Image: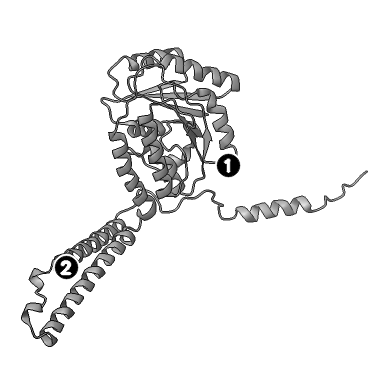
Amino acid sequence: MLSIVIPVYNEEESLVKLHEEISEVAKENEYDIEIIFVDDGSSDTSWSIVEQLAAEDSRIGGIQFRRNFGKAAALDAAFSRAKGEIVMTLDADLQDDPKEIPRFLAKMDEGLDVVSGWKKVRHDPWHKVLPSRVFNWMVSRLTGVVLHDHNCGMKCYRREIFNEVRLYGELHRFVPVLADGRGYKVGELVIEHRAREFGKSKYGLNRFIKGFLDLLTVKFLTGYGRRPQHILGTVGLLLFGIGLFMLTWLAGHWAYDRLFVELEANWIHLHQSPLLIYALGALLMGGQLLSVGMVAELFIANHEPVQHEYSIKTELEKGTAEKVCATEKEDDEPAEPTETA
């Protein structure tokens, strides 16, 4: 089964047409599908339309939030209820073309676990396209997962990914990065991006500010989620070493002046040196980072992790290999001749 997840926020004009397009694709390709609409606190009649569609089509399910909780929460709620082995996400504004679904599934058949859409030709205003391209470049550079369009809402996943990747905040755009950190194979696919027919974009400038902060979170989780002292302790030791070096230099300079410089006017006075403040600041900051890193390590060591540090692709149970070898040996032995009367 293919599960199609569609977050909805004030998209009453486009839902019926989107359902018709998905149904047409499923019929042409003989797909066994389910469609999960998640109403993320819409203030229009979106939920009423979802209820109507569900009454007419048994393949449709719906989730209605009490208020707007964000796209990540909407996707997380749908992923926990999806029954398909493959999960497809697309936006409800009709800018994602359902006719691309067969191409996504064909790409998944190449051995990929995540396929992200790439809106190579976009039909959005320049003040949205330019920051998005800068953001995508920055994410690719910092995480090592090179995708041209991390923000694209049209993506395809294997269902088991969400047993290991937890969504919250604004982390929905970083699922490929989080999946790559768990060892899953990630790729992308150039798709057609259609101009918006109804409504207006729900994202503003704060989307990129939150996205940058979430990028720092993802970088920390994928690189140092199980070993926070490696990053905090490294920075802490560096600052502590710099502060100690500056204090040692100041102490040596002070002792040299008292022993070898006759004029008191040329002596260094520690309370008047800005370097002393910098040295103490570096020492304090370094000590704090080391302490925070140690507390984080103690927390991880004494609390059962939500997920393991590793991700298993295939597991061979004990005795399976022996059974396989025995079966092959029996097949290789010549059959005994049968007695004839």
Is any atom of residue 264 visible in this view? yes
Residue type highlighted by circle 1: Gly
- Front residue of this view, candidates 132 and 65: 132
Q: Is residue 189 above or below residue 61?
A: below
Q: Give SS at disc 2.
A: helix
Q: Position of residue 175 (x, y in %)?
A: 41, 40
First in sequence: mark 2 vs mark 1:
1
Q: Quadrant of the C terminus?
A: top right
Q: Nearer the viewer, residue 277 or 140?
A: 277
Depth check, front residue: 327 or 209: 209
Q: Nearer the viewer, mark 2 or mark 1?
A: 2
Query: In the rendered image of this protein, does residue 95 appear above or below residue 279?
Result: above
Q: Compared to 262, does 205 lie above or below?
A: above
> Can residue 164 be seen?
no
Residue occupying the point 40% across, 49% down: 142
Direction left: furthest residue: 264
Alpha-carbon neighbours of circle 1 within 10 Å: few (<14), some, or many (≥20)?
Answer: few
Q: Is residue 100 left or right of residue 81?
A: right
At which x and y percent is residue 15? 41, 17
Residue at image position (70%, 51%) is 327
Q: Nearer the viewer, residue 312 or 102?
A: 102
Q: Tell me the distance, in whole angstroms, between the alpha carbons under discs 2 and 1.
A: 58 Å
Q: Look at mark 2 in the image and give the residue it sits on.
A: 275
Callout 2, which amino acid? Leu
In this picture, residue 260 sits left or right of residue 102:
left
Looking at the image, residue 187 lies above or below residue 201: below
Label ID, residue 111: 1
Instruction: Report the disc number at residue 246.
Output: none
